Amino acid sequence: MITIHRPSVRTLEILGAGLLFLLILAFTIWYVMTHPAPAPYVPPEVATTTPIGPLPAQTIEEHATYYDIKTTFPAETPLKTSANAKADVAAVGSMKAFVETTIADFKREGNFANLSREDIQIMRLDERKESLEITYDEHVSTSTISYVYYLYLDTLGAHSNSFYRTFTFDSVSGKELGLGDLFLPKAPYLGRISTAARIQLEADLGEFADKDYIADGTKPELESFENFWIEEGNLVIVFPPYQVASYAAGPQAVSIPLTDLADILRPAYKPAASQ
């Protein structure tokens, strides 16, 4: 008698799954071979511009036998964008001329090319040198752009000396401004500034305060307040040593709120709060 063995249901399920897998694999291989992959997406090139920052400051240095010179001034100013390129070039030119003139004066007064052996011995120039150093800070307000130059001069006397020279420009026109340009015509600004400066200096100087010395250095004259700039809503005026106090007291500065002067300022230079 012949016995017929029928496959179990479990065996049939396994065979069916294997067959289905083979069919899927065959279809996948066929699809890949007959349908090449699309090229990857490459976004179109877009022209870009790398922003160029402000140019580095320019320098003039000299190191000679009897003197050292180290000076710096800006290669460009914010006037290039707030006003125009012509105003920027003019401002840089003015400041460069100031630096070059100061260097020429230093050399002429030092008479370095004509020093005698006796001069060299008396001044001990075989051991030390005279020196000139000029640095600057930039101050930008809503209506002005200013540069404050610090001059350090050592001519081998009892002590070195320091001086200031400021340049203030209208940020829209690019014009260099004198102190009087900030105020309305015929405004009594010199008297107002003089009074405010004296009050501040007497308070700030403390034991170095000498009313006569301060009064002499803050006369209501343009020469008394020629070094100025606008910063954070204040008119700032700086005084070198000896102008309002002794050398030991050092340089001094006063800061007068523009709101205190708003009634005599030109509209362009009034603080926003008072316009």
Image: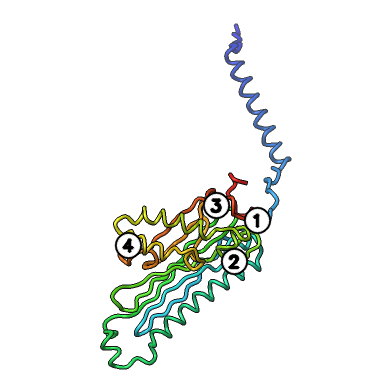
> Would residue 39 appear left or right of 75 to someone viewing this image?
right
Q: Earlier in the sequence, mark 1 or mark 4?
A: 1
Tag 1 residue:
48
Q: CA distance from mark 1 to mark 4?
A: 55 Å
Q: Secondary structure at mark 2?
A: loop
What colour scheme was applied to this rendering of the protein?
Answer: rainbow
Q: Earlier in the sequence, mark 2 or mark 4?
A: 2
In front: mark 2 or mark 3? Answer: 3
Q: Which mark is residue 144?
A: none
Residue type, label 3:
Leu
Residue type, label 1:
Thr
Tag 4 residue:
249
Residue type, label 2:
Glu
In front: mark 2 or mark 1? Answer: 2
Q: CA distance from mark 4 to mark 3?
A: 28 Å
In front: mark 4 or mark 3? Answer: 3
Q: CA distance from mark 1 to mark 3?
A: 48 Å
In front: mark 2 or mark 4? Answer: 4
Tag 3 residue:
261
Q: Earlier in the sequence, mark 2 or mark 1?
A: 1
Image location of residue 154, percent across then percent down: 35, 75
